[in-house]
Image (spheres, rainbow, N blue to C red):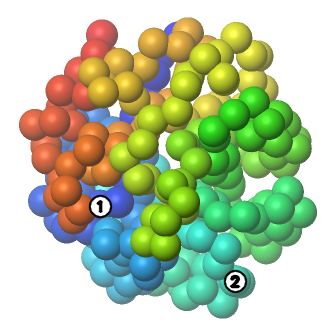
Amino acid sequence: MSVASKICGLSSEAAVAAAVDCGAAYVGFVFYAPSPRAVTAARAAALCRNVPPGVRRVGLFVDADDAAIDAALSAAPLDILQFHGRETPARVVYAKARFGRPVMKAISVAGLDDVSAAAAYEEVADLLLFDAKPPRRADALPGGNGLAFDWRLIAGRDWRLPCVSRPRSSGRCALSAWRLCAVGSRGLSLPRRWFCPELATTALRPLAA
């Protein structure tokens, strides 16, 4: 089974170009102000102009209201909405109908109970994204904190939706059922605001093999 890649948190033309050159099938833009990688709707629109046909543009939101999502969509041609907060299954259903976009729902994982909670979203979302549960500290982001979780928690299950997860440190996505692998600057344990094309290429090369 082939594995596609998603690179998120892009905020410059150079980073977008590098992600595309690395073969990313999805590129992500963060619309969450506390994130050091956040972009405005206008900035995202400019960056989206550099994304070629065939590469899907993902907007990441955290418990955003309709007005915030409307503002982003009115400026930037986003293909997918990524919900990385506490959005309920009902919110996912509503957003898909309201905005006419597929929804990728992030699931924070620390234990089996978290994985079990994903079942409710399998019925309503279009993709699932598994990320490590944020640390218990005031400055922690909802996701993308450069933390790992035990992949055995999600292995061996017949997921009905395409799934996304951050790669292991080697960049390999070894689960046979996996469709997507997400690569982000913090997922590769780089300092904030940094994007390294060389490390992204190293991470993505095994996925194309």
Q: Earlier in the sequence, mark 2 or mark 1?
A: 1
Of 3 and 76, the residue lying toward us: 3
Is 42 on the left or on the right of 130, as rendered?
Answer: left
**Residue 49 occupies which quadrant of the picture?**
bottom left
User: Does residue 129 appear in the picture of this structure?
Assistant: no
Mark 2 neighbour density, 10 Å: few (under 14) some (14–19) many (20 or more):
few
Of 152 and 100, the residue lying toward us: 152
* In this view, 131 is above or below 33: above
Residue displayed at 51% across by 55% down: 135
Residue displayed at 83% across by 62% down: 88
Label 2 is placed on what type of residue?
Asp
**Residue 187 occupies which quadrant of the picture?**
top left
Is 200 on the left or on the right of 131, as rendered?
Answer: left
Q: Position of residue 181 (x, y in %)?
A: 45, 32
Q: Position of residue 200 (x, y in %)?
A: 21, 37
Residue behind mark 1 = 10
Residue displayed at 28% across by 34% down: 23
Mark 1 neighbour density, 10 Å: few (under 14) some (14–19) many (20 or more):
many
Q: Please count the marks in the image.
A: 2
Label 1 is placed on what type of residue?
Leu
Q: Position of residue 208 (x, y in %)?
A: 31, 18
**Residue 83 occupies which quadrant of the picture?**
bottom right
Residue displayed at 16% across by 36% down: 199
Is 187 on the left or on the right of 175, as rendered?
Answer: left
Q: Quadrant of the C terminus?
A: top left
* Whether label 2 touches label 1, CB < 8 Å: no
Which element is circle 1 on? loop
User: Does residue 152 appear in the picture of this structure?
Assistant: yes
Residue behind mark 2 = 65
